[in-house]
Image (cartoon, grey):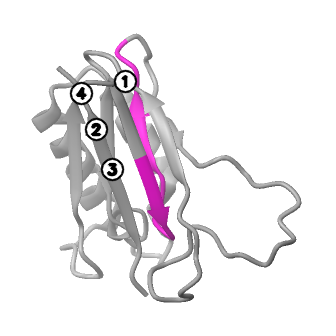
Amino acid sequence: MTTAAVVAYYSEESKARISYAGHPPVLYRRASDKTWSYARPPVRKGQSDGILTNIPLAIDLDTLYEQLTIPMDSGDRLFVYTDGIIDAPSPKGESFGLARLKDTLDANAGAHLPELKSAVLKTLNQYTEKELTHDDVTLIALEIC
């Protein structure tokens, strides 16, 4: 199964636009906030038209991919990652999970981006207690200037 998160930042509008195809949510943090938030698309109520939305790629040709818009200001941050991070298993087989990732980001909210990424990888390695060979582990952290 192939998932994707497409993230585009439009500097002239100061907005990030995000679309998902079965991918875990991007996290963002406003410069004025101490915690990170999930960039989740709005829940569609009463979906009875039978049209699938935001599912992994190549599952259904008629899938619609919604777009989420987030206003961004100088100092705001985005964190994009693959599911290899949240699916990383502990020695007992328990996944690292979204909550642990968010807790790690929150604990390092004021860190410079290279330190933030290192903190996530260090926490992940401590949790798994081994080399990360279960899946790809990719992350991107960026800050709006």
Residue at mark 4 to residue at mark 1: CA–CA distance: 9 Å
Residue at mark 2 to residue at mark 3: CA–CA distance: 7 Å
Assess disc 2: are there few (<14), some (14-19) or many (≥20) residues with their C-alpha within 10 Å of its C-alpha: some
Which SS class for mark 3? strand
Query: On residue 7, which mark appears?
Result: 3
Quarter of the picture holding the N terminus: bottom left
Amino acid under disc 4:
Ser
Can see residue 36?
no
Query: Mark 4 and mark 2 in contact (Cβ < 8 Å)?
Result: yes
What residue appears at the point 38 percent right and 60 percent down from the top-left corner? Answer: 5
What residue appears at the point 22 percent right and 73 percent down from the top-left corner? Answer: 132
Q: Is residue 47 above or below residue 36?
A: below
Amino acid under disc 1:
Met
Q: Is residue 61 above or below residue 77?
A: below
Q: Which residues are magenta?
A: 18-31
Which residue is tagged 2? 9
